[in-house]
Amino acid sequence: MTDTGVFEQMLKLGKDNALLRFTLGSAFFKQERFAEAVEHLQKAVEFSPDYTAAWKILGRSLIGLERFMEAKNALQTGIEVADSKGDKQAAKEMQVFLKRVEKALEDS
């Protein structure tokens, strides 16, 4: 079974939650399967809108798909969430990616 296979099986068994979706999204992100990552990460933030790490990887996955406006929105939301939770490191990381997205939008 693949890295994602066990988790996809859990999903089929109805064990759907933010952590499972984040785990799947992160695994697909690492495999550069960005569309699949986005699908699961969007669900993760629906389940748990304050899931900072999910917002970060969602933004990066959208960048991978060159969906820059959506990436900008995800990263901005992620930064707000991180700031509200005092997660300065995550906010800084997302600010770096947000600057790249804004540059890509300017250049397009």
Image: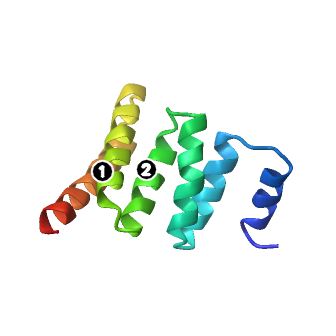
Quadrant of the image for the C terminus? bottom left
Which residue extends farthest right? 13
Circle nearer the N terminus (1, 2): 2
Judge the density around disc 2: few (<14), some (14-19), many (≥20) Cα neighbours within 10 Å: many
Q: What label does residue 72 carry, if any?
A: 1
Residue sitting at 39 percent across and 41 percent down?
78
Residue sitting at 52 percent across and 38 percent down?
51
| Front-lying residue, 55 or 91 | 55
Where residue 16 appears, as percent x and y from the top left, is: 74, 43
Quarter-of-image position of residue 64: bottom left
Q: What label does residue 17 carry, if any?
A: none
Where residue 28 appears, as percent x and y from the top left, is: 59, 66
How many numbered dots are placed on residues in this image?
Answer: 2
Residue sitting at 59 percent across and 45 percent down?
43
Query: Is the residue 28 above or below the residue 53 in the image?
Result: below
Disc 1 marks which amino acid? Lys
Mark in front: 1 vs 2:
1
Drawn side of residue 68 relative to residue 99, left or right: right
Disc 2 marks which amino acid? Lys
Q: Which residue is mark 2?
A: 56
Quarter-of-image position of residue 84: top left
Where residue 11 appears, as percent x and y from the top left, is: 78, 52
